[in-house]
Amino acid sequence: MSHDSHGHGGDAVGFHAPHVVPSMLFFKVLVALLFLTFITVAVSRVDFGSANMLVAMGIASVKAALVMTFFMHLKWDTPINNIAILSSFLFLSLLFIFTLADISTRSATDPALNEVAPVLDYRERWGLLEH
Amino acid sequence: MGGVFALMIRLHLWNPNTNPTDGLFEPDTYNQIFTLHGAFMVFMFIIPAIPGALGNLVLPLQLGAKDVALPRLNLSSFYLWLIGTILAVGAIVWGGVDTGWTFYTPYSIYNDRSVILMGAAVFLIGFSSIFTGLNFIVTVHKLRAPGLTWFRLPLFIWAIYATSVLQVLATPVLGITLLLLVFEHVYGIGIFDPQLGGDPVLFQHMFWFYSHPAVYIMILPAMGVISDVITVHSRKPLFGYKMIAFSSISIAVISFLVWGHHMFTSGQSEFAMFAFSFLTFFVGVPTAIKVFSWVATIWQGSIILSNPMLYALAFLIIFTIGGLTGIFLAILNLDIHLHDTYFVVAHFHYVMMGSTAVGLFAGVHHWWPKFLGKTYSRFWSRVACALIFIGFNVTFFPQFIMGAQGMPRRYASYMEEYQPYHQLSTIGAFVLGLGILIMVGYFLHSLFAGKPAARNQWGGVTLEWQSPSPPPLENFDEDPVWVGEVYDYSHLKAEEMSR
Amino acid sequence: MSDGHALPTTPTPAGFVPHEVAHHYNSHVQEYQSWKLAFWLFLATEIMLFGGLFAAYFVYHDLYPETFRVGGQQLDWRMGSLNTAILLCSSFTMALGVRAAQTSEKGKMLTYMILTVAGAAGFMVVKYFEYTAKFSHGLFPGAYFNPHGAYADAFAGLSGANIFFGLYFTMTGIHGLHVLIGAGLILWMIKRGAAGRYHSGHYLPVDIAGLYWHLVDLIWIFLFPLLYLVP
């Protein structure tokens, strides 16, 4: 094997050298994240109607992107690691899209299907919670 | 174990049991038996079979690697599988599970608590599957021999890679679904329980988000095996190499878009049914590309009717039937009629048992001499192959007919009109069982008294045939380097060509 | 091949334990990149796992919008914000800890990791107070949901409150479990780091523990607005 010749002191070609990022950059990211948290709380007091969820998830996504890009070093990482993690978000969105597509179009066919079932108190199933 | 359950089911269905207590088993016991047959076969056998058994051996060799990238993770994946299986057996002892392998809510919430144990078992086995897939992806990306570029990889690797992507991305959703089912038992979280305001159809969405891709987790590795076996035993480069490679990946991606076709009768919205039915047809395209490419590879090849090749041919026939009947089921209005009938049972057995298991047998016969360094009986292996092929078709073809006539699945009793079909099916099952028994027999014989195998038993040109049989500890005597194109038989020696 | 030979090691600063590259890898780069890719894939599975819970959340948010709004008001947004800040800061200290491992600054590395574990502990303490408060009001998950007094009035005429709290406890519970696992990993890194095992020639385990910790933060970033400030 070609690397057998390399003893202590390592292998100049095959050694992974760390990529060191300035501490100040991390600090700036932290400040941005805390500021965005403040924004998250602030916008929750404003009513954007049906866009509420989009706004909240949009801000959260920006925060998540900051954490992944800088804290998790994705910016300096190999493309395949970026693809690996992004594909999970992509495929997750498929789960959301199709499931919600079903739930939100059910009333179009039969309103009865969309009625909420009555909540029965069946806790005695386990003979628990007598109070 | 799953096979024994299957034979028990077939024995029970010999008679119509018009009076439910007439049968070999009580109806409740019957329900437990088919659940165990399904759950054991799906989660404990078919899903891990090809990646776990063949993949771990063949993949590093075909890549020219010393081992998989993370050997300890691999070991832990095996232990997880073992613990999961023990828990599943525990669930049987603890009272048995009778929900069917799909664990549909709300029934699975209200029945016996051994569902908790079974859920935990499948959760662990799911993680075992994830770790295997993860390991393979890393190995393919990082441990290829110098010169072995992506488009020089054997197609078995491509198929396993596509499978691994599915395992990594889909299995966690099954994990959380079963965890939620367990929570449903523990503290009635309510999200799958209509009595608590939940929506049981959500369970089906989340379950099939995994379990539909899981169908491809089962079949893709078999397709990979068949690609490799066909090219080696036809002595011809694969027709449409890149198309087969891409079709594996596109099957993997499309499989995430079609899960709703399992739920046409479950009360999802018409819009969702329409969308899922439409998208399902797209699966046919890459699948057909594969079948046509295999046939085109065999055409004018120097075919050697060795045992693996016989299995590969059996695979082609069975898989084509299985695949075509899948298109019937994708048609929304036809599926409403065929849903939950034996037609569906026959369809997925043609794909799962007839294709995946036959693919596994092809692979085992193909690589057996490589890994154990022993040959097996040519005569008996042909007998077994014939019995399996005939037995399989006799078992499951009548089920298509019964299903189309309306015989529902999972029933312990049936109308007398169906009896001839059921009896034929039972006879077939025992022929199939006999074939497998013979196979076990000659493999055992080979293990203890087989003749030594050659380094390159079949005249293959991928990297695994450059390693000695059986391979040494780190797979190769010296680090392999890949030169030339994939599946290039032009420089094969004459004696290897004709073997 | 490797029998009788010393395995190749990476460059090691004075006073640290050298790292041997495992025998089945051809180089340290290969080893490092394999582990990194494997761990990113693992994180992808974690995201898919939580994704199932998020899917359930979105579905019931769609079916019971009013209940979820009221449910969110029962949670203390100040506690939630405090925990968000704690996690963000601990993520920051962990990033610095990994950086210190890269530059072989052992003392700094240990300090930052201890700060991170302290953050984890702080998070769990806040969580403890939140959970006990909910329990004392009868806001139990799922079938045990049995609100007292004013809390029962808040949900009068609304169905699905049991599901909101079922999801709240399940999501934060599984997340809390991840906090504990992450803290455990970092404690293990502290122990081994103190023995001088991590340095510029081998910081992979610290890196991986860090990635796990950032993931815990990442999930909380989504949980916080969805549960405490129901949009």
Image (cartoon, coloured by chain):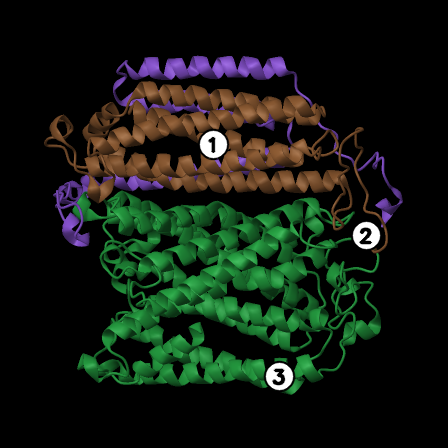
Chain colours: A purple, B green, C brown
Check disc 2 and report the residue beneath it: B481
Q: Mark 1: which amino acid?
A: Val
**Towards the viewer: C173 or A96:** C173
Mark 2 Cα within 10 Å, few/some/many (few <14, many 20+)? few
Tell me where residue A60 appears, x and y as whole percent: 42, 23
Q: Secondary structure at mark 1?
A: helix
Label at residue B349: none
Q: Which mark is residue C216?
A: 1
Mark closer to the observer (3, 2): 3
Image-based side of C130 in relation to C83, left or right: left
Examine the image and state in which quarter residue B244 appears.
Answer: bottom right
Q: Is residue B243 visible?
A: no
Give the amino acid type for the residue marked by disc 2 in the picture: Val
Q: Position of residue B170 (x, y in %)?
A: 45, 47
The residue type indicated by label 3 comes to: Tyr
Q: Chain of mark 3?
A: B
Which quadrant would residue B86 be assigned to in this image?
bottom left
Using the numbered discs, state the Cα–Cα distance from disc 3 to disc 1 in whole angstroms: 53 Å
Q: Position of residue C96 (x, y in %)?
A: 61, 21
Which structural element holds mark 3? Answer: helix
Up/down of A42 relative to B384, above or below: above
In the rendered image, which residue does mark 3 sit on?
B442
| Secondary structure at numbered mark 2 | loop
Quarter of the rendering occupied by the N terminus of chain B: bottom left
Q: Could you confirm whether marks 3 and 2 are on the same chain?
A: yes
Q: CA distance from mark 2 to mark 1?
A: 42 Å
Q: Residue at x 33, y 13 (%)?
A: A42
Q: Do marks 2 and 1 share a subunit? A: no
